[in-house]
Image (cartoon, grey):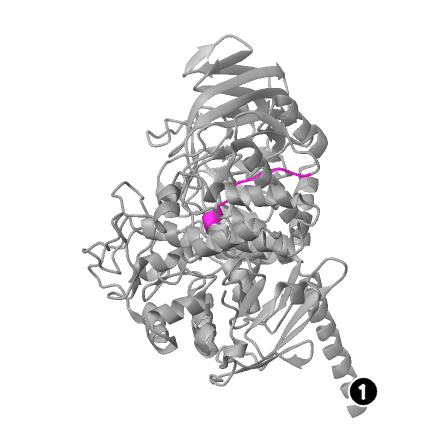
Amino acid sequence: MKTTNTILILVVALFYVSCSNNKVQNERLTSLVNPFMGTDGPGNTYPGATVSFGMVQLSPDHGIPGWDRIAGYFYPDTIITGFSHMHLTGTGAGDLYDILVSPINSKATKTLKENGYRPYSTFSHDNEQAEPGYYQVFLQDYGINAELTATKRTGIHQYTFPEDDNSGFIIDLGYSLNWDAPTDTYLKVIDDTTIEGYRFSKGWAKDQRVFFTAKFSKPFTSFELYNNNEKENTRNTKGKNTKIIVQFATSNQEKVIVKVGVSSASNIGSTKSITVEAAHNDFDRYRQEASNTWEEELSKISITSNNETNKKTFYTTLYQSMLAPTLFSDTDGHYKGADGKYHHAEGYDKYDTFSLWDTFRAAHPLYTIMHPERVKDFVSSMLSHYEQTGLTPVWPMQGNETDMMIGYHAIPVIVDAYFKGLLNEFDSDLLFEACKSNAMDDAHGIKEYRELGYVPVSYDHENWSVSKTLEYAYDDWCIAQLAKDLNKTDDYNYFLERANNWKSHYDNESSFMRPKKADGKFISDFIAKDYTDHFCESNAWHYFWFVPHNIQGLIDITGGSNRFEEKLDSMFTYYPKDDDKLPIFSTGMIGQYAHGNEPSHHVAYLYNYFGKAWKTQERVREILETQYAPVPDGHCGNEDCGQMSSWYTLSSLGFYPVNPADGIYVIGTPLWDSASINLPNNKSFEITCSNTSDKNIYIQSVKLNGQELKRCFITHQEIINGGQLEFEMTNKPNKQLWNSKEAFPPSY
């Protein structure tokens, strides 16, 4: 009997182990993603339906303007006006919200001045859900359940109506928020299931054009066209403010599908978006296909951890790293160019929405690991921008150059991809011409920068002189490296000299980068912690560290490693006072360090450059654990088109690109028991950690492919070749680890 009981216990135990293993194996990574992360607080994300890097971002709009609703949605709000097809993810820019579709019925009677007197419904988060590629909400005033999903270029809506003789939809092209304003709109009724038109607008994108085609699964029995709120008895109308109301009777729980294809080039393109990508009316099939697309993308990195909260944070940030850049060319390759003309992308997909001041730092290096083929399309898109305008993009969106922020940061993206071997088929001379173009321009202080070796102070709005000098100098270093590889010796020497221009702003008296006038004198009224127009959304504390190509030079000019360490320690311990005036973008504060804004993102890794890797490990773990969470207010600052998320993704794996264009990843501290980066050609890069725990944040030792790693960095080539990185963790700092100069990351 005892033997029988023992066998029975073993069988039951094996059964539960098997079930547990199957659960792990069968767990969909999409179930770990919370698209609401960043919809509260300063994150400025949207929760709606899209596919990775898709043209359509179909998401709910409250219909009320303001900073908190810059992405159309703010978690604390309680009303929904409709669902528009384009949204920015995590920015501070109030644009898009194009092609608003609103379901209505007899109960759609409430309006607000704040939403332009449009019908709205209240809703509850208890009757709302989101997952990658899908969004659902119950519009409780109407009794209508709304479900959204998407293909690359088409938004798919499914609405479940109650019984009502006056059900229907409003397509409102006059709807706008924040910076956006329509300039010309057009609506045409093709038949009782098809409407097409366009919405041209100005705002952050000065000349945005969206053509659309809407197809309904249920014929409408009547329609009303409005131009500037005046009813028109025609089948088409044109003006700045047009809308259409279509109506039909519905039975209880009747489902109606609306498919909206979009294009930047033509209604031929918007119709093809539907015919090529959304020919049928099976909503659940579209939803499953979108989910499968996301599952495939998320599966490129697998992690193992008993901390479910951290796993959800990881896969949510991985998801949000793939919401931009966004597809911009039609199924046949046509798109609206930055020169205002229509173009055709030959042999590549055209992308736009490059938040380069943010994303060059970590998002684009992450893409070179996860999406090498798509990186080629990104670079081709940047080159097409150069060919149309004479300059590489700064912050392009919807076929426009917004000139938002500073630097010419398409260059590190291009140079990084070039040296990682992703651009071997490209015309190298064209690449160099494009990279050189912005650096030889006269706008944005570049003329003065060339002539003086720095950008001088002016008191124009957003002069940002110190920040511009530092970022131009880094971009110039990138150009120099490309010139060297292409044997362009004169260009190499010229741009390498310009890469040292950061030194022009160093002030021995204050030990900071200090604003300088055109006569060569530093300004007299200078307080490092003050936020002024001399620094781009930052202060002198934040920008002191931005010399990613020459950290050793920065250490030397500061007075050596001891003085540099003291200053770096102070960065994390010198907290603002209660009466200090902090701007809206100064968030995620740890001392003067502001994780909520991008200039600080590499700073925690700088201890590695003088032998104090254990301090990097402390700070990186602190940021990972305190600045992110898989909840609505889980981002400590604007998510910024994937940069905030990419920082977490890479840092949690144990490394980060301090210099985003040298193919080197500096080691921080891993968060996972194990991780696997699944690479092309059936290769993988495995990361394993022994002795992991909440307290074991320090690295005792590291092996790369079975050999002791005697340096505090790994290379891109080592990752993509496949292999194994083994960490041994401990709860005490190993102060002897990587403390010799031979172990430090390279400094050029």
For the stretch drawn in magenta, the main secondary structure is: loop
Q: Decide if residue 143 is on the left or right side of residue 367.
A: left
Q: Residue at x 33, y 53 (%)?
A: 466
Q: Residue at x 58, y 80 (%)?
A: 710
Report the residue marked by disc 1. Answer: 4
Q: Can you give x and y, in whole percent of width and height, for residue 305 in the image?
A: 59, 71
From the viewer's side, name the closer residue of 208 and 29: 208
In the rendered image, the vertical position of residue 361 relative to residue 8, given as above or below: above
Is 463 part of what is drawn in magenta? Answer: no
Is 351 part of what is drawn in magenta? Answer: yes
Q: Can you give x and y, in whole percent of width and height, for residue 747 in the image?
A: 49, 67
In the rendered image, the vertical position of residue 463 relative to residue 302, given as above or below: above
How many labels were placed on the picture? 1
Q: Can you give x and y, in whole percent of width and height, for residue 732 in the image?
A: 47, 85
Q: Can you give x and y, in whole percent of width and height, for residue 8 in the image?
A: 77, 82
In the rendered image, the vertical position of residue 333 relative to residue 488, given as above or below: above
Magenta segment: 348-357
Q: Quadrant of residue 461?
A: top left
Q: Residue at x 67, y 61 (%)?
A: 27
Residue flagged by tag 1: what amino acid is it?
Answer: Thr
In the rendered image, the vertical position of residue 454 relative to residue 177, given as above or below: below
Q: Decide if residue 297 is on the left or right side of residue 562.
A: right
From the viewer's side, name the closer residue of 362 and 730: 362
Q: Is residue 658 visible?
A: yes
Give the quadrant of the N terminus: bottom right
Secondary structure under badge 1? helix
Q: Residues within 10 Å of mark 1 (few under 14, many from 20)?
A: few
